Image: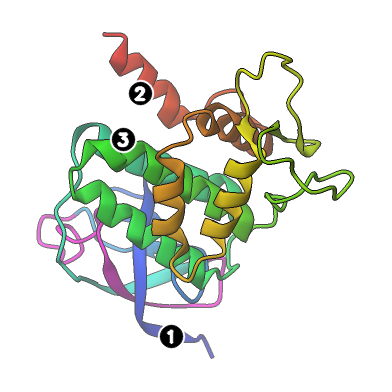
């Protein structure tokens, strides 16, 4: 007997046309991870799904079936936040692309769901000064949740402690390593990496990491390279779109 799940917190990550009237949705759910569902008739003007199945909006959904693609039974918009616009909207699509590329289906990550929900609230708040730190915080916590982030308070290869004023870089294949630039440009200091590890271990890790990342501009290129490596691409689609729009 096919199992039916009800009242499941969820976000729409992506949607595909399935037929003239229906959609296939990639959902991030709190207790079931990333799943695919078919929303039958969702493209019809009269469908109750039509105004609800939007990205970056909190939902409660019900679905059933035991196939790879389940059937969406209902979806309720929880309200409480506006749709991000401009750079914040593109940033939300970027988070969604990371989740689709890096999360296996049917692999629950409740803590990561909560981090994503917190990040989406920041995007909807329209506060440009914290947008980039929020992205860095999400990237770090995503990598840690799926086991791709080494401990940031020691050198990865040797497990040696970090020297507070020495600089270190995060590498895809080597983890946290000494920064080779003798003049000290780039990388982050040992003190900064230790502070970031403490933020990730905080009881409210997203907001703690956001605050820490606000003072760490050199974090962005290192995380970008790490994410591209694990996603198997040179540039993510959403990042290319951002660059194209900025170049207009």
- Residue that numbered label 3 is attached to: 90
Q: CA distance from mark 1 to mark 2?
A: 39 Å
- In the rendered image, which residue does mark 1 sit on? 4
Q: What is the crowding at mark 3: few (fewer than 14 residues within 10 Å), some, or many (at least 20)?
A: some
Q: Which residue is depicted at the point 67% across and 13% down?
A: 183
Q: Which residues are magenta?
A: 44-69
Q: Residue at x 79, y 44 (%)?
A: 155
The majority secondary structure of the magenta stretch comes to loop
Find residue 113 and name its label. none
Left or right? Give the position of 64 relative to 61: right
**Image location of residue 101, percent across then percent down:** 56, 45
The answer to whether residue 21 shows anywhere in this view is no
Indicate the quadrant where residue 76 lies. Answer: bottom left
Element marked by disc 1: strand
> Image quadrant of residue 108?
bottom right
Where does the image place residue 187, in percent across and percent down from the top left?
Answer: 63, 28
Choose mark 3 or mark 1, whichever is in front: 3
Question: Judging from the image, what secondary structure is the residue with disc 2 in?
Answer: helix
Q: Which residue is mark 2?
A: 242
Report if the CB atoms under discs 3 and 2 are less than 8 Å apart.
yes
Question: Callout 2 environment at 10 Å: few (<14), some (14 to 19), or many (20+)?
Answer: some
**Mark 1: few/some/many CA within 10 Å (<14, 14-19, 20+):** some
Residue 53 in magenta stretch: yes
Of residues 9 and 226, which is closer to you in this image? Answer: 226
Q: Residue drawn at (50%, 69%), measured in percent from left and top?
A: 111
Which residue is painted at 49% across and 72% down in the image? 110
């Amino acid at each position: 007997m096919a199992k039916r799940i009800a009242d499941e917190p969820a976000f729409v990550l992506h949607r595909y046309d399935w037929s003239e009237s229906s959609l296939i949705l990639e959902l991030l759910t709190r207790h079931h991870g990333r799943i695919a569902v078919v929303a039958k008739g969702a493209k019809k003007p009269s469908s109750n799904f039509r105004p609800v199945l939007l990205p970056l909006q909190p939902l409660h959904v019900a679905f059933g079936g035991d196939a790879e693609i389940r059937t969406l039974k209902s979806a309720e918009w929880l309200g409480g936040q506006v749709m991000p616009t401009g750079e914040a909207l593109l940033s939300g699509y970027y988070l969604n692309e990371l989740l689709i590329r890096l999360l296996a289906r049917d692999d629950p990550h409740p803590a990561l769901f909560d981090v994503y929900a917190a990040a989406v609230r920041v995007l909807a708040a329209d506060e440009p000064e914290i947008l980039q730190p929020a992205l860095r915080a999400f990237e770090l916590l995503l990598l840690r949740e799926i086991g791709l982030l080494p401990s940031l308070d020691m050198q990865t290869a040797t497990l040696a402690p970090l020297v507070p004023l020495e600089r270190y870089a995060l590498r895809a294949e080597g983890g946290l390593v000494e920064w080779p630039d003798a003049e000290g440009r780039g990388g982050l200091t040992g003190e900064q990496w230790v502070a970031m590890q403490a933020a990730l271990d905080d009881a409210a890790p997203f907001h703690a990491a956001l605050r820490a990342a606000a003072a760490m501009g050199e974090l962005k290129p290192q995380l970008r390279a790490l994410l591209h490596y694990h996603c198997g691409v040179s540039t993510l689609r959403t990042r290319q779109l951002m660059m194209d729009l900025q170049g207009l």
